[in-house]
Image (cartoon, rainbow, N blue to C red):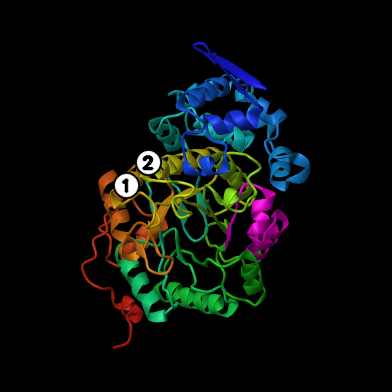
Amino acid sequence: MYATTMGSVRHVFDGLKEVMARATPLRSGDVLAGVAARSSEERVAAQYVLADLPLSEFLNVALVPYETDEVTRLIVDTHDARAFAPVSHMTVGEFRNWLLADTTDTAALTQVGPGLTPEMVAAVSKLMRLQDLMLVTAKCSVVTRFRNTVGLPGRLSVRLQPNHPTDSAAGIAASILDGLLLGAGDAVIGINPATDSPAMARDLLCRLDEVRERLEIPTQSCVLTHVTTGIALIERGTPVDLVFQSVAGTEGANRGFGIDLALLAEARDAALSLARGTVGSNVMYFETGQGSALSAGQHHGVDQQTLEARAYAVARAYAPFLVNSVVGFIGPEYLYDGKQIMRAALEDQFCGKLLGVPMGCDVCYTNHAEADQDDMDALLTLLVASGVNFVMGVPGADDIMLGYQSTSFHDALAMRELLGKRPAPEFEAWLVKQGLCDGNGRIRPVTLPPAFATLLPAA
């Protein structure tokens, strides 16, 4: 039991799980789960309690039981006590001050990262303003490599997302052409297939690999199909670069996705066996989103943001190339409006980067959310300013297959222009060679490179 007195009112919280939930900034998912603070005063009281708790409390109290949850066992069993030592004496509030201190630099954050649990970073995020989250995230650097290098300081990569509602070869090729001409695709050329047919996934992967080889693009491809399909395709000799899977922060929620930790390890081993990377061997692509455990009925009474941070512990275990917080995709039942989506996205970047995860973000919303493209413009700018590894590039910002609003190739181009960000270095060199980049990182397509004409649909 934890308690504090504010004025004449004594606030009592029944355990660490309740303190964490009540301290969380308001979001509709926690209200839906019945764990949100019942008033602003109660939220502040919980934040006071949280600020005074030792970080070590999270090593002694499991929010989701160790005995019944393999994600908890992963977090506890892989904790690096040596890395934790520099901050082990701190309270959550003192840890916040340490993170924001000018003397705490990228090297210090990288060193302490393996010693932090997701519950610790979720706790400290609850005491931070958006500005605080951004300042710390900007100091974090998580670099990954496959055929190019993503996450370097001063760089912004883009997932080229050429989805099509019928998986039309011509439609996908047109979107890829559009994206490449505007400097997108260095994070990955990744397709969400309209169906989860293994035959279609194989066909799409072969097409993507043919385009990549023909144009000699230093990037990687992915078809976002279930991990079991990915393993089967590798066994059939399909050209799989990155293996995809959605992951969550509890064993039960992952079971709802049809996965467990052993299966993820099998998938990574399978992808590594192909040895398709040229500059590195990060071969996994994970997607996450606040509310996934609640939607699966596997949240254990824990607030959705803490569970999201636990998903990053799952991702961290498999050295992924990309981790994408699809922040507004799950809907207003979990993040109601633009303000809640903005807060969640910046929390996700903070928690993921602090845990050593290569975070990107799908800056997005569904059409029934209380949000619009102005909200997304603001969020995109904040994320890029705080050093997000990659964002989405969707033709016109409107995914006509998944039916949601995201960010366009032009949006990413605007961010590179506005904030001085450049593509991944190997990809930038390729853009210069194609005559699409001026050598200073600015995308300047003038004419269609001759080789690109092969992507044009037949007359």
Q: Which residue is mark 2?
A: 339
Residue 58, position in %: x, y?
Answer: 66, 30
Residue 53, position in %: x, y?
Answer: 61, 21
- Residue in the image at 68% along x and 52% along y: 252
Of the pair 161 and 371, the residue shown nearer to us: 371
Q: Alpha-carbon neighbours of circle 2 within 10 Å: few (<14), some, or many (≥20)?
A: some
Of the pair 142 and 17, the residue shown nearer to us: 17
- Secondary element under disc 1, as helix, strand or loop, is helix
Residue 89: tell me if it is visible: no
Magenta region: which residues? 244-272
Q: Based on the displayed image, in which of its 4 quarters is residue 72 positioned?
A: top right
Label disc, if present, on residue 375 of the rendered structure? 1
- Residue in the image at 73% along x and 39% along y: 65
Give the total of numbered labels. 2
- Residue in the image at 61% along x and 31% along y: 18
Query: Is residue 379 magenta-colored?
Result: no
Going by the numbered disc 2, the residue's amino acid type is Lys
